[in-house]
Amino acid sequence: MKTNMKSPLIRFMFHVVMATLALFSYRSSALAQTTYLPHYSTKSGLASNTCYFIHQDKKGFLWIATSNGVSRFDGTNFQNFGIEDGLPDTQILQIAEDRQERLWFFALNGQVSFLKDGKFYNASNNKVLAKIHPGAVVVSFLQDKDDRIWLGTNSNLILCIDGSTIKTYSSTSKNRNFLDAFLHQDKKGTIYTLSDDCVHRFDKNNFERVNININPLSYMNVANIGNNALVFLNKEGLTSYKDGVLDRLIDIPYNLLKNCSGYFYYDQPKKRAWLATLSGAIAIDSAKKTIKYLQDIAINQVIKDKADNIWFATNQGLYMLPKESSRLSIIDAEDGLSSNVIKSIAKDNKNRLWLGTDDAVIDILNTNTFKTDEVGLDDFKKFRTITQLVFDATSNSMYFSSEFGLGVFQQIDKNTSNVKYLSETNNSLFVIKNFDLKNKYNKLALALSSGVVNLEGYQNELKFNTSSLIDNENFIKGRAYHVYYDKKGNLWFANVNGLGEFKDGEIIKHYKNDALLTKRINDIYELSDGTLLLATDGYGLLFYKNNKIIKQLKQSDGLTNNICLKIFVKDNEIWVLNSAGVNKISNYPASAQIANFDYGKDLLTDDVNDLFIDDSTAYFATNRGLILFNYVKNRSNANGPPVYITSIKKDQEKLPLNIHHFNFTSGNNSIFLMFNAIDFSTSDITYRYRLNTNTPYIETKTRRLDFSSLQPGDYNFEVSAKSQNSDWGASAAVSFYIARQFWQTWWFLVGALLMAGFVFYKLAAFYIKKQKDKEQNDLKLK
């Protein structure tokens, strides 16, 4: 899902006809980039698309209250819980957590349950919860300084759970009662209830109405924050209340407030209020800067997690707005581009991006103003798909190619009307796979389906004659995939045979140096130290120097995939586009660190066609538009994600999670363990585990381990996790002792051995005696 970053959203292009030219047409428009929000639904594993409430627990898990139970989310996996697990109803409206780390669940039917140490407690297995019969829906939760639990409801009723005692409070007033009461405790410990039109204060025995001007729009638009303060939305805007003092934080127009329908969120560090409305989420700060997300989608709640991601609970599932450093933006046809499909990308010296499309059009995007110029090419059939763009800074020209032709816009700092096309003298058809040029040496190379063409003097005349090409001089036979001029002007090429080089009039067959060099090569780039980077089709990234492969990076080393398609190098960082995502390699050659941009996984996958990396922004040409995001140079590896053991079973019996050591004296000794790492920026999590501290770790991608028929002894299970961009995190551990059964004890074995010896002795004695008796009988007969 994507949402506009500007208001109002510009959804049209303003066309200005500059000229009617024989070769091309030209038009101009303004663009608005939009922000991409990952979306999670039942297809992702969520229990229901109707999400009422989100809570992040102290460990970091997200809990989502839905119309079909509760989902727990670790960033990758949803685990769903329902009535069969102990919830009081399928419709869970709100979740809260107390200081004892009990998760409380409040249902539509008015019943209450909580989760503690992996076990659900409800009216059927907890005496205190069995006493709760509110006959109304719980709308607010408070744990006071004395650890009493206070519950406000949608009727004239307040409940207090004090140990094993349940106390109820109601008001005799018909108009000024406890309807939809929100609960608050100040610094002195005094309890307040806030309703739409009145405030009550608890005097140790009952509630009395007090004259405090706290008038929230609803219980969904008031929140307790740190230091015993609260914030609330009223008809004027956002106001705080602390120690008896009211302070206006943000003035908000009422036309924005009147549609508030869900739980709002106040971001204290950024001094920004998030409004949950019927037509989207609105962020507004103290400067009244407003941004709207999820246009025309009803928002039930907005929260921010511990990693600064913003989450939205809606009737269409769960949406996430990543933290600012991880956000992706999209520019596509809805925003003004000529097409969603962008096949190639390059940048000129006027800070303009040239975007090759699939409809014989090149869009020219100014990255400062986001104004676009659209240039249409005259031969639609020949130049329908612009597969490659190359900017020549020396001549200030932009070269472009399709599968069936090549052209150049000359002197683009002046205009885009000066266009020339590569021609074949005999008008023979040629198929271009790739091209490269070296202005310094006046050379142009073409990778054709028939071979490699090396043209000298292309700046003088942009044409060639296939019949005059000479084998092994300016033409190298064999289907070619890629061509590249190094810094010295030598031509490197990849064809059906593998990697070759044309140098000083001779062909050097590098593919004979290593079998890997016979594989298909999709891209070539020379590093500053003379090392050639080779993007291979299935064998990862090769580093080639002094006629030998000095390094190979594969999926097992951290690449998203071994099919590498494109290479881009910026400030000594290597960007690799592969068939499953994008990787950035830093700190080469000292110790290559591979980063994965997984937060745009469903965008930056097999739909990416090309890339361009600027000083702080990465651009990607995709089949869904232009994707861009800011990146951090030389990002050091972060700490690994936290991991928690979330289920332990012994012979199918579920064990409590608050016990860290178990003694097992009977059974089949089958242990089942499930664990989760929490990381909302990536789903690429690797785990490592071991059963004893003196044994090596075993790496795995699974979160479930089943150890069958373990031998007696002591076990210390440890598990930790890492993402592709992090180090190993802290371990979670549990230990257990499996006692020997009586037949496994030393005394039983000694006794069994003695018994076996005694039986053997008896049998041997019997046999010997019988043998002697036989011999004596034989002597008597003689």
Image (cartoon, rainbow, N blue to C red):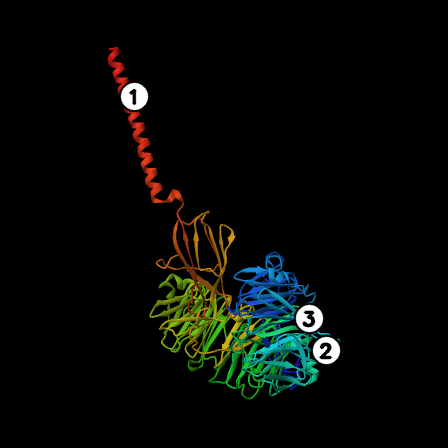
Q: Residues within 10 Å of mark 1 (few under 14, many from 20)?
A: few
| Residue 541 found in image quarter | bottom left
Q: Residue at x 29, y 30 (%)?
A: 761
Q: Is residue 775 left or right of residue 671?
A: left
Q: Which residue is denoted by mark 2 in the rendering? A: 176
Q: Residues within 10 Å of mark 3 (few under 14, many from 20)?
A: many
Q: Is residue 439 left or right of residue 232?
A: left
User: Could you tell me which quadrant the N terminus lies in?
Assistant: bottom right
Disc 3, SS: loop
Residue sitting farthest toward the front: 205
Counting residues from the start of the chain, the first of labels 2 and 1 encountered is 2
Image coordinates of residue 57 in percent, x first then y, are 54, 69
Q: Which mark is residue 157?
A: 3
Foreground: 423 or 273? 273
The residue type indicated by label 2 comes to Arg
Image coordinates of residue 182 in percent, x first then y, are 65, 75
Q: Is residue 362 visible?
A: no
Q: Which residue is denoted by mark 1 in the rendering? A: 770
Counting residues from the start of the chain, the first of labels 3 and 1 encountered is 3
